[in-house]
Structure formats: structure tokens, C-alpha cells
């Protein structure tokens, strides 16, 4: 894993820790903050694996984006697909 990838993985993991108090259906935080918290939470295990030099199942991680979308009405899964398409 490159240092750039490690840096991004570190950031996701740290963001998840910083936003932990904004998780859950009872959170009164504004939607963008809750969405950021759930997005970071959905990917923090992958970030940890990447930092440790381990692999992870990207398809499962992408499915977790869909779970966040269904819970909060966001569109992370579609936006990821568009951002990573060859036409982007």
C-alpha cells in the first residue's frame, strides 16, 4: 500500500472516531454530520485493514455504502460508481 493510500485510510479511521457521537437513529445531529458519521463507520474496518497492510472485500464495502443510503436517504453508492467510472 502506498503512503498516499495509508494517509487516506488513516483519515477515514480518525474521522470515524471523531464522529462516533453522531451515529444512530436517536442522534439529533444535522443530516450531513450524521451521514458523514455513518459513511466513516461503514468503512472504518476497511481503513484499519488497509493501514495494517491487509486486504478487504471492496464489494462488501460498497454494499455498506448502500446500507447507509437506505438508512439516511443518501446516494453514496451511486456517487462512488460515478466517481470511479471510466467516464468520470
Image (cartoon, rainbow, N blue to C red):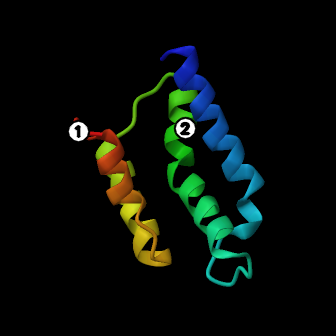
Where's the C terminus, which quadrant? top left
Q: Is residue 52 visible?
A: no
User: Spatial distance from mark 1 to mark 2, Cα to Cα?
Assistant: 26 Å
Q: Residue at x 46, y 26 (%)?
A: 54
Say which quarter of the image contains residue 32.
bottom right
Position of residue 36 measured from the top left corner of the image (x, y, whole percent): 61, 59
Q: Are marks 1 and 2 in contact (CB under 8 Å)?
A: no
Q: Is residue 57 above or below residue 65?
A: above
Q: In the figure, is residue 73 to the left or right of 48?
A: left
Q: Which of the numbered marks, if any, corresponds to residue 47?
A: 2
Left or right: 30, with 38 as reference point:
right
Location of mark 1 (residue): 87
Mark nearest the camera among 1 and 2 is: 1
Q: Which residue extends farthest top?
A: 2
Give the image location of residue 24, x and y in percent: 64, 75
The image quarter containing residue 30 is: bottom right
Disc 1 packing (10 Å; few <14; some 14–19; many ≥20): few
Residue in view at x 63 percent, y 74 percent? 31
Q: Residues within 10 Å of mark 2 (few under 14, many from 20)?
A: many
Amino acid at each position: 500500500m502506498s503512503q498516499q493510500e495509508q494517509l487516506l485510510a488513516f483519515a477515514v479511521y480518525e474521522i470515524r472516531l471523531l464522529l462516533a457521537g453522531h451515529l444512530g437513529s436517536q442522534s439529533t445531529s444535522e443530516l450531513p454530520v450524521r451521514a458523514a458519521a455513518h459513511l466513516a463507520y461503514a468503512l472504518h474496518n476497511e481503513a484499519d485493514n488497509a493501514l495494517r497492510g491487509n486486504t478487504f472485500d471492496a464489494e462488501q464495502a460498497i454494499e455498506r455504502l448502500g446500507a447507509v443510503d437506505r438508512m439516511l436517504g443518501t446516494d453514496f453508492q451511486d456517487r462512488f460508481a460515478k466517481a470511479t467510472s471510466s467516464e468520470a
